[in-house]
Amino acid sequence: MALRMWASSTANALKLSSSASRLHLSPPFSLSRCFSSVLDGLKYASSHEWVKHEGSVATIGITDHAQDHLGEVVFVELPESGKPVTKGDGFGAVESVKATSDINSPISGEIIEVNTKLSEQPGLINTSPYEDGWMIKVKPSSPSELDSLLGPQEYTKFCEEEDAAH
């Protein structure tokens, strides 16, 4: 509600049409949906990693929500190709201007590719967390582990509840 009042007063100050203030947003507006994107077609871990499963390959990165909370990413530590990853275990770290955070694997398998661009351009995680900012590609050893991950709506609700608790 406060955001709508701010938007309305800003629109009036900028002499913008007030018809925009009469729009009804559906689904109901929430701050987390405004500032973080959650994409359909991906699975999400409660530790804020995403997985895009295509054929025999799963691409993994951190979510828009996670990068937003981290702030500007300045360094990324990633493993080498050929290494195994285990669901729930760390495989790397992200260092931002605010903190350093471990990155956990949402699934088990073998790393078949690492995004080497991130060593020179760690900010890709901030500007494109779901595209250019992916971290590793894994050949899943237990594809059924994907079933235990959150869908987009579940992850959105999880983030809203987590943010409300803080």
Image (cartoon, helix red, strand yellow):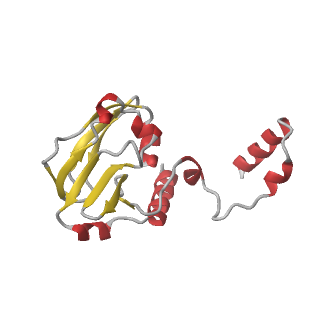
Residue 69 locus on image (x, y percent): 45, 41
Residue at image location 40% in from the left, 61% down from the top:
42
Considering depth in this image, is 142 or 153 the residue closer to the camera? 142
* Residue 53, image quadrant: bottom left
Give me the residue at 75% from left, 43% from top.
6
Q: How many marks?
A: 0
Q: Is residue 27 left or right of residue 61?
A: right
The quarter holding residue 71 reads: top left
**Can you name the residue that lies furthest to the front here?**
55
Q: Residue at x 16, y 45 (%)?
A: 81
Give coordinates of residue 12: x percent, y percent. 85, 40
Above or below residue 48? Residue 71 is above
Residue 25, given in percent of the width and then of the height, sits at: 69, 60
Residue 31 left/right relative to 72:
right
Q: Which residue is rendered at x = 64% and y = 58% of the image?
A: 29
Q: Nearer the viewer, residue 7 or 130?
A: 130
